[in-house]
Image (cartoon, rainbow, N blue to C red):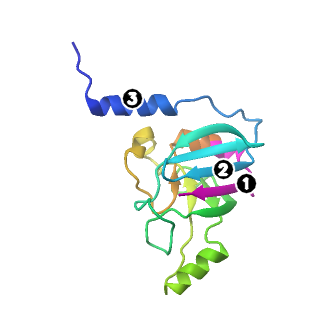
Amino acid sequence: MHRVTPLLCCILAAIAFTASASIPLTVKPDSIVVYKQRHELCVFKNKALLKTYKVALGLQPSGAKQFEGDMRTPEGAYFINGKNGHSLYHKSLGISYPAAKDRQAAYKLGKRPGGDIKIHGLPNGQGYVGELHRLKDWTHGCIALTDEEIDELFDRVALGTPVNILP
C-alpha cells in the first residue's frame, strides 16, 4: 500500500486546480488582471473571465514596487508594451512599468524606479520545473507562468492590452 505525503497532496491539488482548457487561438483577450495576494493572473474578453493562471511573483510579493532592486511586483494600471519570443525566460510580455507616478515616487526616495517588468515563462532550459515554480515567489518583480502558459498568452495577447495589477 502506498502512502501519499501531505506535500504530494498539495502538489497534486495545485496541478488539478490550475489545469483548465486552453483559450481558443481565435479569442483575443482584451484585459489582464493580476491579483497579487491570490497569486492569480486572470484573462478577460468583454469582461468575461477566459482563464485564471496561478503565478509566482517577486521575492517580496507584499506591497507595490517602489524602486529598482526591491524585488517587488508593481501595482497599478499598465499595458502590454512588448513581446519577446527570444527572451531569457522562454517568452515574455512586457509591462509598461514604470508609469509617471512610479518614476516620481522612486525619485522622491532618491532611487531609480527600475523597469523591465514582464509576464514570462521559466528561465530558458528550466521548463521542466513546470508548475512547481509556484511553490515560492522567485522573480525580481515579474509575473511568472509555466512555459506552456506563456506560450498560450503570447499567441493571443496583443500589444496595448491593459494590465491591472492589484494587491
- Over which residues does the magenta segment extend? 153-167
**Earlier-in-chain disc, 3 versus 1:** 3
Task: Measuring from the top left, give residue 55's x and y in whole percent.
Answer: 50, 47
160 in the magenta segment: yes
**Residue depicted at 40% across the width and 55% down the height:** 138
Secondary structure, mark 1, is loop
Q: Would you identify the image quadrant in which residue 133 lies?
A: top left
Mark 2: which amino acid? Ile
Task: Measuring from the top left, give residue 103's x and y in whole percent.
Answer: 60, 79
Secondary structure, mark 2, is strand
**Residue depicted at 64% across the width and 57% down the height:** 164
Task: Measuring from the top left, give residue 108's x and y in whole percent.
Answer: 54, 86
Q: Is residue 128 at all visible to an observer of this figure? A: no
Mark 1: which amino acid? Thr
Q: Are marks 1 and 2 in contact (CB under 8 Å)?
A: yes
Q: Nearer the viewer, residue 117 or 101?
A: 101
The residue pinned by badge 2 equals 32
**Residue depicted at 31% across the width and 30% down the height:** 8
Q: Taking 23 as reference, is 26 left or right?
A: right
**Earlier-in-chain disc, 2 versus 3:** 3
The residue pinned by badge 1 equals 161
Q: Nearer the viewer, residue 118 or 8?
A: 8
Tell me the crowding category of disc 2: few under 14, some 14 to 19, or many 20 or more residues within 10 angstroms, Cα based: many
Q: Taking 138 as reference, is 68 left or right?
A: right
61 in the magenta segment: no
Distance (Cα) linking label 3 and label 1:
33 Å
The residue pinned by badge 3 equals 12
Tell me the crowding category of disc 1: few under 14, some 14 to 19, or many 20 or more residues within 10 angstroms, Cα based: some
